[in-house]
Structures are given as structure tokens and as C-alpha cells.
Amino acid sequence: MNHLTKRWTLAAGLCVLIGSVLLFFGLQRPVTLVVDGQPYSLFSRAFSVRAVLAESGLPIHEADRITPPLNAALGWEAAVRVDHARPVQILDTASGKTFSLTTAERIPANLLAQAGLRLFPADRLEWNGAPFDPASPLPDAPAYLLVYRPATRVEVILDGQRLQLISAQPTLLGALNEAGILLRAADQLSLPVDTPLTGKPLSLTIEPARTVQIIADGKTHLYPVNAETVGEALAQADIPLQNQDYSIPAEDQPIPPDRIIRVVRVREEVLLEQKPIPFKSTYQPDPNTELDQRSVVRAGELGVEVSRVRVRYEDGIEISRQSEASWVAKQPVDQVLGYGTQVVVRTLETPEGTIEYWRKVTAFATSYHPCGFKAGCSYTTASGATLQKGIVAVTRAWYSWMRGQRVYIPGYGSAVVADTGGGYPDGRNWIDLGYSDADYVPWASYVEVYFLTPVPANIPWILP
């Protein structure tokens, strides 16, 4: 080899070595890692599937399915799929056996094959209690319980005709319903309808009933009849309809498919009913009664309304009542109540010292803070003040005369009415305790609200 060739060979070797070092220490290739159907994007210096999985820290087990194989080399923008093995139980209803697998397979038909079970077109596979397509992949789950119901051949003899059914329903009744064979209560079957289908052939004989079932006077009777209408059947059974009695179906209707006839006995009576007429309440100021207290100036009296009512009974049960006439036997007398207008100033010892208050009201307390609203953060109150502890909100009806009123709430402290809120839909007294975001405390309880002196010039004697 001449000197020129040696020089080129040495240069090429150095380039390969430098490129490998740069690729190992500097270059990272994009890799898509799909774990149980969930894709993840990452960058890796690894050159094989095994190295990428080791670098990602993803635990791998022998039964897991890895595509490409662990020893496969990775190209640029490689994709690696990992399907973790899951515990699978398959219940074979024919044999009663349960097969347990640990596999990454997700196609039910393949799982049955792994368990040694042959799946035919009429067979039924259930997952989570519902039929599932054996060719469709199962959604990812920690574990699977599959129920395999092999189809059962059922020979049905009905009215002398032989019908062949193939069904994977759990019971004989399900197979009959599936085939459109509807049973009536009096039909005679050679096998119970809850007979399980286990894959073994069955033979069933159905003898349709030719009797009618008549329900009358609290009793049920079975009568063999050759009638075509309900009226004829009742006559042959010697069960007549009297006065306003009626039958279901009606007398002129054919006997129904279920051959059940109901006789309804009807009677009516007239009653006189009394209903109280409520009295109204009116209010007048009472300077001798303390604020927020009530006095009875005149007691109210209920009135009386009398009605003549016709009541209809069917089989002893009241079905309807209709008022035919009514009149007032006694007029109500309205109640007159006095509302207190006497203001009394009292004191109360609190952690903040002695307070003077002129009114005490029980209210349901809630709380709010600037960033607790669904629409976003709001720091400004109806009065223009910044929402923080010491600001309370009341309904707009209260706010119109309480704005700026100083109050004291045990457990919360002194505050000023400076905001409005929606209140409670049931109309209870309500107050909303303000906080900043940093010191927010949730409230949902009844409290006493003390209105502090001085007493305002305009006082609503009755709270709205």
C-alpha cells in the first residue's frame, strides 16, 4: 500500500471514530414509545429497542409483547410498541371450567384459541356482562374476565311443528325470546324457562294454553272456554257485569292473546267534606314590643267550606272524587299582629372587647374570596371596596338599607356590609363572609349577626 492510500485510510477511520463519538455524546434521536396504546415522545441516544426501554425505566416482563423485538436496531424517528401482559380469565359455561392466562394478546378470539377453546359463528363472548365482538381488541384494563357461551342447538315442538334453534343465550327463555317465541303464563313447557344452555342439545315441547284467566272479586279463576269475545267468555264462566261494572278488555272485544280478563267492580257514594279556609295576617306597629318581636293584637279564626263530593271506587280502591257543589259555612277572621318598634341597645363581651349592638339576627353564613367565582377572580365589591376579610355581603334587599352598617359575627369578627350576593333560594336570612385568597375559610352554618351601634336613622322594622 502506498503512502497516499494509507493516508486516506487513516483519515476515513478518524472521521468514523469522531462521528461515532459525536453521535454517542451529542445526538439524540426522536423515539415514539407506545405503551398499552398510549403514545409517548422522547429523545434517546440508544441504538436498540432494549436500550431505549432500559433508558425509559419502563418495566418489562417476559410475557409482554414488544414491537420491534428487543434486539432490533433503531432508525431515525423510530417507534417502539409495548403491550404489557395482563391476567385473563375465561369462563367456559359448557364445562364450567375457568382458564387463566397471562398474556399481551387483546383479541378475544386469539385468547380463546390460547385457552384451547374453539369459537364458532353462533357462539357468544361476553366481557363486563355484555356481548363483545371476538375480533375486536379489548380496551386496556388491569385484568380481564371473559365468559364463553358456546351455541346450543334447541329443538322446539310447538303446535305439532318442529323448529330448530341455535342460540348462545344464557337460558332457554333467552333463546326463545331471541327466536321470537313469546310465552304466555298458562303455556306448558317440558323444561323450565330458566334451564341453562351449556352447549349440549336440548329438546323442548310447548303446549299453548286454551283457557282464560279471569280476575274478579279479588280472586283469580281459570276457565276452559270456546268463546271468541270477552262477553261470551264471562257468560260461559257465569261471572256477570252489574250496574257500572266493566271488564278489561271490554265485553265486545276479542279474547286477548294472553287470555287474561279482568272484571272491575264499580260503586259510587256521595260525601259532605269540610275544608278549612285559612285566615290572613295583617301587621301594625307596636311601640311597646321590642324590635323583631311579635305580639298578637287579634287572634285569627279559620273559616269552613263545605263540599258535596261524588267518590268513585273500583274494586274497593278510590279512583276519583268530583266536587258537585260547595258553599262557605263560616267566613274566616283575619289575624292582626303587632311588630315591635322598640330599639334596645345591649352589650356583649367578645374576643375583640365589649361591643354595643341594637339588633341581633340569626342568618345562614357562607363565605367567598376573590378567586372563588366560576367566572374568574373579582376583587371589587358592590361598594367599591376591595374584597378581603372584614367585608360581608347580604342580599340586595338588605343592602339597600344596610350598606356601611357595622356588624359582628362570632367566629369571624367585626365587619362592614359592603357587598351584595344572591342569597338562598328558600328565603332564609343569609350573610356571605368575605376573605382574601390567602386567608379563606369556608363557612356553611347558622350564626348570630350583631348590628353595632350607632343606631341608624332609618330602620326596617320587618326584615325583607
Image (cartoon, helix red, strand yellow):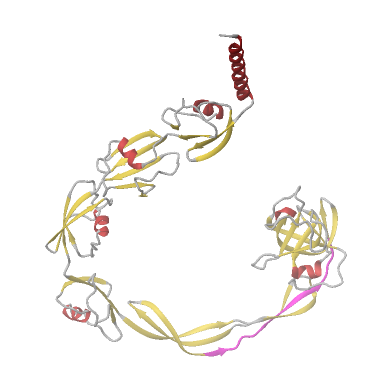
| Residue 283, quarter of the rendered image | bottom right
Residue name at image x 52 percent, y 40 percent: 39
- Percent of width and height locating residue 451: 81, 63
In the picture shown, does residue 234 fall above or below 352? below
Q: Is 103 drawn above or below residue 452 in the view shown?
A: above
Q: Nearer the viewer, residue 148 or 314?
A: 148
Instruction: Determine whether 445 is above or below 33 in the image.
Output: below
Q: Is residue 436 left or right of residue 300?
A: right
In the displayed structure, would residue 268 be above or below residue 413?
A: below
- Whether residue 333 appears in magenta in the rendering, the answer is yes
Q: Which residues are magenta?
A: 327-346
Q: Is residue 66 left or right of residue 332?
A: left
Quarter of the image where the C terminus is located: bottom right
Rendered location of residue 175, percent (x, y): 25, 55
Q: Does 8 appear in magenta?
A: no
Instruction: Assign the N terminus to one quadrant of the image.
Output: top right
Front-most of 122 and 410?
122
Whether residue 369 appears in this view of the structure is no
